[in-house]
Image: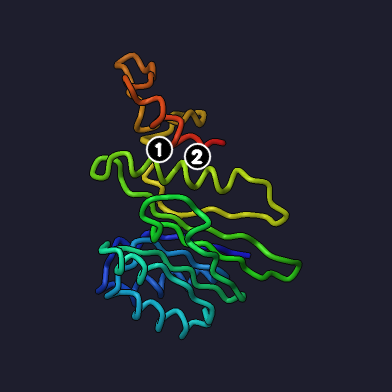
Amino acid sequence: MRLISWNVAGRVKRCEQQVGLITSRAPDIIALQEVTTKSYSQFEYLLKEHGFNHIIESVQLGSELGRRYGELIASRLPLNKLPASDLKIPWSERVLSAIIEVSNGHIEFHTVHIPPGSSNGWIKIDIFEGIYNRLAMTSDVPRILCGDFNSPQFEKPGGTIVTWGQKEKPNGEVYIKRNHQRWDAGERSVLKD
């Protein structure tokens, strides 16, 4: 099974080009972040033309809540949308979840667009914590989480994660910023644990 996840950055004029690039890689499942109400119908039409007959979205929910973006999952395999209420997070349109039917069972699938903390503050961490709390539960089926996390700040050689709750000294030493323990833990909960 091949999956492609892409933040389309709300672009409307490039839907055809983006779908062409994505489908040229022959995926089975596509997860798009930052889909707008203006671009959704174009994506839906183009993806169906390429055989992605199973499509769900959270764009309409975002619009109803007065926000610009939502997510989209397109699949060649049958899927069933999971209720947004399964995740206790602000901005519920930023996570889209489904059960995807595969030849030997099911996969629980989630795509997310976590907003940047620089412009949205602690909402970013509330969403990280909500995702972690939902996915930390045991499951009888495999799970996939993909999307745009706007994290980490960077990774050091060797894989050390530096979160936005941390700062690096000129000598390379990394420390948690004052009063940012929860921020650091929130990002790490999904990225590392």
Q: Quadrant of residue 27?
A: bottom right
Marks 1 and 2 in Cβ contact (< 8 Å): yes
Would you place residue 150 above or below residue 110 in this image?
above
Say which element carries label 2.
helix
Residue 89 coordinates in the image, percent (x, y): 42, 50
Residue at x-position 50% and y-position 39%: 191
* Residue 82 horizontal side relative to residue 90, left or right: right
- How crowded pointer 2 is (Cα within 10 Å; few <14, some 14-19, many 20+) is rated as some
Question: Looking at the figure, which quarter contains the C terminus?
Answer: top right
Marking on residue 191? 2
Instruction: Give the amino acid at mark 1.
Output: Pro
Relative side of 136 to 113, left or right: right
As helix, strand or loop, the secondary structure at mark 1 comes to loop
Q: Quadrant of residue 12?
A: bottom left
Q: Which residue is mark 1?
A: 152
Q: Earlier in the sequence, mark 1 or mark 2?
A: 1
Q: CA distance from mark 1 to mark 2?
A: 8 Å
Q: Is residue 38 left or right of residue 149?
A: left
